[in-house]
Image: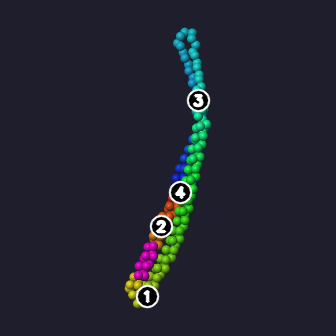
Amino acid sequence: MRNPELRAEYARLGLAQADVLEAGRLSNPELSLSALDSNAAGERMQLGYGLVQNFTDLVLLRARSDLAGRRLAQEKARVAERIRSLALAVKGAAIDAIGAQQVVKMRDIIAASARASGELARRFFTAGNINELEFTRELAAATAAALAAVGARARAGTARWRLHRLMGLGAHEQ
């Protein structure tokens, strides 16, 4: 309900409902009063009044009401489709965000393992049990794993931002 696009859709639906109410009403009648003074001696002032209603409003009332009702039904169907579409988008974004967070956890574990392997390789290299090439390969693997973890965090943040945007939440709201 906090999605701004969905709020705009509901506002349009409210306008369509207002159009239905407006179409079912007759226009206000016009009341007129007039006073004629002839300026002749002994003549009385003549007063006149009138009430006028637009006859075409009365004739077209049912047709206008039916048309507005059809427009409201179309608007309801369009809003329902938009809600369904948004719900599917939110569900997909939630799945993406959860998956991205799981990838972050996996990449963090891999990075921790690669750091531990790099530390062990450093000890082996210091002890002379492996050569410099093997040691450099282990350090490169640890660095690559750390970079992959950072990239996974960035993708998770983007997925979480997309989900929050679709739900109409702020950046730090849960």
**Residue at 57% in and 15% down:** 45
Q: Earlier in the sequence, mark 3 or mark 4?
A: 3
Q: Earlier in the sequence, mark 4 or mark 2?
A: 2
**Residue at 59% in and 22% down:** 49
Identify residue type, mark 3.
Phe
The residue where tag 3 is placed is 55
Residue 39's x, y, as percent? 52, 12
Q: Quadrant of residue 147?
A: bottom left
Identify residue type, mark 1.
Phe
Task: Report, in whole angstroms, how far the alpha carbon at label 1 lies from the one at label 4.
Answer: 54 Å
The residue where tag 2 is placed is 155
Task: Report, in whole angstroms, how far the alpha carbon at label 2 lies from the one at label 3.
Answer: 66 Å
Task: Report, in whole angstroms, how far the alpha carbon at label 4 lies from the one at label 2.
Answer: 20 Å
Q: What are the residue bounds of the magenta stretch?
A: 137-148
Confirm or deny contact between disc 4 and disc 2 (CB under 8 A). Answer: no
Q: Earlier in the sequence, mark 1 or mark 2?
A: 1
Q: Secondary structure at mark 3?
A: helix
Indicate which disc residue 124 carries.
1
* Residue 70 in the image: above or below residue 128: above
For the question of whether residue 173 can be seen, the reply is: no
Residue 101's x, y, as percent? 52, 69
Quadrant showing the C terminus: bottom right
The residue where tag 4 is placed is 168
